[in-house]
Image (tube, rainbow, N blue to C red):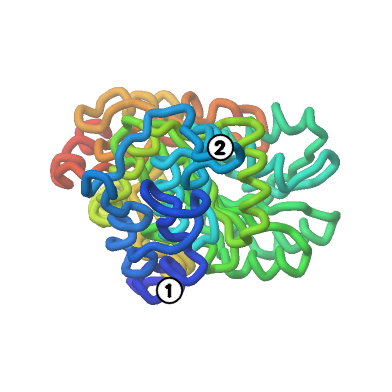
Amino acid sequence: MSAGSGAPDGSGVPGGSGSPGGSGSPGGSGTPGGGSSRASRGGFETLAIHAGQEPDPTTGAVVPPIYQVSTYAQDAVGNPRAGYEYSRTANPTRTALEECLAALEGGSRALAFASGMAAEDCLLRTICRPGDHVLIPHDAYGGTYRLFDKVLATWQLSYQPVPMSDPQAVKHALAQRPVRAVWVETPTNPLLSIVDITALAVMCADAGALLVVDNTFASPYLQNPLALGADAVVHSTTKYLGGHSDVVGGALVVADPGLGERLAFQQNATGAVAGPFDAWLTLRGIRTLAVRMDRHSDNALRVADMLAAHPAVSRVFYPGLPGHPGHEIAAKQMRGFGGMVSFRVRGGEAAAIAVCGRTRVFILGESLGAVESLIEHPGRMTHSSVAGSPLEVPADLVRLSVGIESGDDLLEDLRHALG
């Protein structure tokens, strides 16, 4: 397949002149997150290993140290050393992660959070005010829906579910009333719908709305929304970026430095920051992101092909299949189709739950994006919060996070589970 214009290839946005470098990293000068490093340009794999991760100036360690510290000695009153004064505000290990994320997404600034939901909450409370209106996907992640419906609704923030893969539906919703932000997932969770980011970016610009893209399913290796016109990118770094089911975290990456400053103020004021060890684990995961995503994508396509031909399966959701309605757009704006596959089981909810309970290699559990394969029933698990809402998922739906195990073993396991 062809890589889209946002694909990191060394000549595109990642590593461009707007990418932050490494002078705020351990041993650097100036304020945390500023300046440029010798690894601020290059191909994706090079940036993933080097951006924000200069060798430690004291020991020469090639991996950034874990700065497990709360406060820092200051050279004089009002003159903190290298800009560090308190770890809620900035920590060198977190700075390294943030600089790496900004380089990979081609943003002016990145911020690392304690969870993906903390990142979402910080962004929305920064860009929105009570009385504002936001468009969200009609098949959004359950936690995102819960944040809008149960938390931010009490803050007088209204929302409207819209099928984001239908540009005309989005255009109509934008024309109905002023919209502060359009929230996009692509691919969506759990139905793997694809959204044309470039088309929506034009619409949002015309309507004066910010375009926010949750890039968790694709990861910055497969897709770069800022290069396609988005204003902000959201990640649950717990997933593909961390990649090993051993850390919880989130991130925001933005194009506008002014918005980055506002987000940093909000983050410091509310305090939902990534801890230094969590930041270090996420950086470690990012170093192998490219090779992992290639294997995730290869295995997922094999799984999707097998499921599409299986008599116990009524429908498969995977953008890598030519019959997927978003296949051509995904091929244009993504570098690969990712490791997430969903499918509907003939026999209804009971049959779907039974399949989830019969796998041996696929582990029954929530989350996604790690080296091990996971299986879950969205209606009873990750998306139970949308039950009874317009975002309710089919009861016979099963979601797979396809890992990097032997593809043959994964196919055999699913065939056994399907009976």
Answer with the quarter of the image where residue 172 lies.
Answer: bottom right
Amino acid type of disc 1?
Answer: Gly
> Which image quadrant: the C terminus?
top left
Identify the residue position indicated by label 2 in the image. Answer: 89
In the shown orientation, is residue 332 left or right of residue 291? Answer: right
- Of helix, strand and loop, which one carries label 1? loop
Numbered tag placed on residue 12 in the rendering: 1
Residue at the (56%, 31%) spot, across then down: 272
> Which image quadrant: the N terminus?
bottom left
In the shown orientation, is residue 66 left or right of residue 327? Answer: left
In the rendered image, residue 77, in percent from the top left (x then y), is placed at 59, 37
Residue at the (78%, 64%) spot, across then down: 207
Badge 1, how many Cα within 10 Å: few under 14, some, many 20+?
Answer: some
Residue at the (63%, 61%) spot, across then down: 256
Badge 2, how many Cα within 10 Å: few under 14, some, many 20+?
Answer: some
Q: Residue furthest bottom?
A: 11
In the rendered image, residue 133, in percent from the top left (x then y), is placed at 79, 46
Which dot, 2 or 1, sits closer to the camera? 2
